[in-house]
């Protein structure tokens, strides 16, 4: 009797209920395929074509022509520079905000993210006004007698870097802020109760626990800076040429789609390498140790 | 210790034989703390002997955690003093108090191994490398966690984390150990095991210990003395036996023993409660008084028991719970009391709606002020 019942039960068991919830993601998948995957494939395909013939010429030019190497160097240096400055400025800023009284934090955070809500073009022109020869900064410094001649601020790599930094700073501050607020206050209290000074608590408990947030922020800033176009174009005043500017030039002035897409592909590969590298480092650092 | 000894003299004397350099005395005088307009600590006095285990017990919001945090140095009191040993530490920051603390969810550093966690207070004190290694090993062995030195805290079970937190709080040989709800994250059987383990370790080391809990059973099991907090004041401070058997007021009585408080009336020369004459009732002061009816101290009878206080009532429900049956009885006051009856193989002696008496023996009769 029991055996029969069991047998019947077993036969019924494998009948699985089909789960169709995955179909809910279909619109997003289709959208991504159309606007992201297809263009990427086309981009890569174009970069291997010249005058209807398959070729590697675009890539050999990028890797051998001194002009292109300079552009790659400039772009890389700008991105790394902006990233480092974002850490140096953003981390203390985050720390300051996290330590504000609770009611002031949303306001401070809103002020930091304000640049995200204004047009990049508007901000870039604002910097130009501030930095130019007869701009606000130079006038004030000259009126105060600090300098006799106006400084060359705009139209340098430093001007470009400053403008870019302003734009990417919120992108660094937000993930780091989240990482800092998620640190359990009890851990800091525990460290104090165990006899550690405030400085020691910061370097041995607080800072290490923010590393994942800092890494995420650095990655976002670096990748964002790699593709910067308008800001270095305007604030660099033609002296700073980045990869994206060269892409625009190739595509719009010369209709060199192959050259333009090969540069795009290079940027994409560098960004991919950065992501891979940072996740490798992240794994090494935490080795599964974080909750 | 004898049941009749008063705690003021008995406890410090009993423990002084086990006095060790680790056992600092703690003296709290007139400690007050308010958060905006809410008074959390209302001029608390507390005196703890060397090597004593004191539990701060109270419902949430009673001020017990604030008191512990003030001892640790994380809460700055508005008024009053705290002394450890003979040192006034009222305004000493936590990192200079040399107090070991076990936090509620252990607060182990997630980015460090077990060994690094335990070494942390030693590194902060700039102890030499070889000495650190030796003391960490000893501390881990003491809590039977020697084999886990290289693990990360998230790879440990709740009980193991508890042991590491304890090892870390004790490795630098503090004069006082504080524990904030140390067992609340553990399941029941592990909690009971850890209560015994922690108590044994504490006695072996002779370290003065203050723990906070809202679990009266835990307090009774572990502590030499219990301080019961209510609305920012210490309602009663005494041995486990004192606070359980001789509660000073209705709050302590009901908090310690799941008791129902039946109002007591003056009737002629005697006292009555719930329609029963209190037999041989203890002397009580004026104001409102209550008879304490506990599930374990009263028995159920179909007829009044001579020489006892018999409160008339009606059975509401009887629920079988294995070794015992829990009866719920409605008194004449409308209050419902619970009476436990041991099952002895026979069917329950009463049925629902039956008129019965809740009978309290003279020795168990307890009358407390409001």
Image: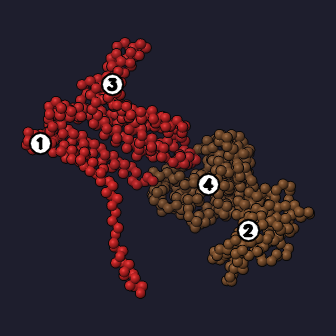
Chain colours: A red, B brown
Q: Identify residue for label 3.
A: A125
Q: Is residue A42 above or below residue B335?
A: above
Q: CA distance from mark 2 to mark 1?
A: 93 Å
Indicate which disc residue B330 carries: 2
Q: Chain of mark 1?
A: A
Q: Which residue is mark 1?
A: A49
Task: Give left or right: position of A239 versus B235.
Answer: left
Mark 2 chain: B
Quadrant where the image shows the N terminus of chain A: bottom left
Query: Which residue position is annotated with label 4?
Result: B179
Mark 4 crowd level (few <14, some 14–19, many ≥20, 10 Å Cα): many
Residue A177 point in image, percent of width and height: 45, 41
For label 2, the crowd category at 10 Å Cα-Cα, with few meaning under 14, some 14 to 19 and many 20 or more, is many
- Find numbered disc 1 in the image and state the secondary structure of the residue it sits on: strand
Q: Residue at x 17, y 34 (%)?
A: A251
The quarter holding residue B344 reads bottom right
- Extreme-bottom residue of the structure: A1
- In three-dimensional space, the C-alpha distance between marks 4 and 3, rounded to whole angstroms, equals 59 Å
Q: Position of residue B61 (x, y in %)?
A: 65, 50
Dot 2: what SS? strand
Q: Chain of mark 3?
A: A
* Mark 3 and mark 1: Cα distance apart in space: 38 Å
Which numbered dot is residue B60?
Answer: none
Task: Answer yes or no: are tags 2 and 3 on the same subunit.
Answer: no
């Amino acid at each position: 009797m029991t055996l029969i019942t069991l047998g019947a039960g077993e036969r019924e068991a494998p009948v699985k209920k089909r789960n169709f919830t995955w179909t809910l993601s279909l619109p997003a998948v289709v959208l991504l395929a159309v606007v992201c995957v297809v263009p990427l494939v086309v981009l890569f395909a174009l970069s291997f074509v010249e005058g209807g013939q398959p070729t590697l010429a675009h890539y050999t030019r990028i890797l051998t022509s001194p002009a292109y190497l300079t552009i790659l160097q400039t772009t890389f240096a700008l991105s790394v520079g902006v990233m480092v400055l974002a850490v140096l400025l953003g981390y203390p800023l985050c720390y300051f905000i996290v330590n504000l009284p609770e009611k002031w934090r949303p306001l401070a955070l809103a002020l930091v993210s304000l640049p995200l809500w204004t047009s990049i073009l508007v901000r870039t022109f604002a910097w130009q006004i501030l930095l130019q020869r007869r701009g606000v900064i130079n006038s004030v410094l000259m009126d105060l007698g600090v300098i006799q001649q106006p400084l060359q601020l705009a139209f340098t790599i430093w001007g470009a870097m400053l403008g870019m930094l302003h734009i990417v700073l919120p992108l660094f501050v937000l993930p780091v802020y989240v990482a800092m607020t998620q640190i359990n206050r009890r851990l800091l209290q525990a460290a104090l109760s165990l006899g550690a000074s405030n400085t020691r608590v910061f370097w041995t408990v607080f800072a290490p626990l923010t590393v994942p947030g800092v890494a995420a922020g650095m990655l976002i800033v670096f990748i964002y800076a790699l593709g910067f176009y308008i800001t270095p174009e305007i604030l660099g005043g033609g002296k700073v040429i980045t990869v994206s500017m060269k892409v625009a030039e190739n595509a719009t002035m010369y209709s060199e789609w192959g050259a333009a897409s090969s540069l795009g592909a290079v940027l994409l590969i560098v960004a991919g390498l950065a992501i891979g590298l940072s996740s490798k480092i992240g794994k090494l650092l935490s080795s599964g140790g974080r909750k | 210790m004898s049941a009749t000894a008063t705690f003021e003299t008995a406890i410090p004397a009993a423990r002084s034989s086990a006095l060790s350099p680790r056992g600092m005395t703690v003296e709290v005088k007139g400690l007050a703390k308010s958060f905006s307009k809410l008074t959390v600590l209302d001029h608390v006095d507390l005196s703890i002997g060397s090597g004593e285990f004191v539990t701060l017990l109270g419902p949430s919001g009673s001020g017990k955690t604030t008191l512990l945090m003030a001892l640790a140095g994380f809460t700055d009191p508005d008024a009053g003093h705290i002394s450890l040993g003979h040192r006034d530490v009222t305004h000493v920051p936590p990192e200079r108090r040399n107090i070991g603390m076990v936090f509620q969810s252990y607060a182990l550093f997630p980015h460090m191994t077990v060994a690094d966690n335990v070494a942390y207070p030693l590194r902060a004190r700039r102890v030499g490398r070889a000495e650190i290694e030796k003391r960490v090993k000893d501390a881990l062995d003491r809590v039977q966690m020697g084999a886990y030195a290289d693990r990360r805290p998230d790879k440990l079970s709740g009980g193991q984390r508890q042991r590491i937190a304890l090892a870390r709080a004790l490795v630098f040989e503090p004069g006082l150990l504080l524990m904030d709800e140390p067992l609340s994250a553990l399941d029941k059987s592990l909690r009971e095991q850890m209560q015994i383990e922690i108590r044994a370790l504490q006695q072996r080391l002779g370290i003065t210990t203050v723990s906070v809990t809202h679990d009266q059973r835990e307090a009774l099991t572990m502590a030499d003395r219990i301080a019961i907090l209510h609305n920012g004041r210490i309602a009663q401070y005494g041995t486990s036996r004192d606070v359980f058997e001789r509660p000073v007021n209705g709050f302590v009585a009901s908090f310690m023993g799941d008791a129902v408080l039946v109002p007591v009336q003056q009737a002629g020369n005697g006292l009555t409660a719930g329609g029963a004459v209190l037999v041989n009732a203890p002397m009580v002061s004026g104001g409102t008084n209550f008879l304490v009816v506990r599930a374990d101290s009263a028995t159920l009878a179909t007829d009044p028991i001579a020489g006892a206080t018999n409160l008339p009532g009606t059975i509401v429900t009887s629920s079988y719970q294995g070794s015992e049956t829990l009866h719920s009885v409605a008194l004449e006051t409308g209050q419902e009391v619970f009476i436990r009856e041991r099952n002895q193989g026979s069917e329950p002696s009463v049925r629902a709606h039956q008129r019965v008496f809740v009978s309290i023996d003279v020795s168990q009769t307890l009358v407390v002020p409001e």
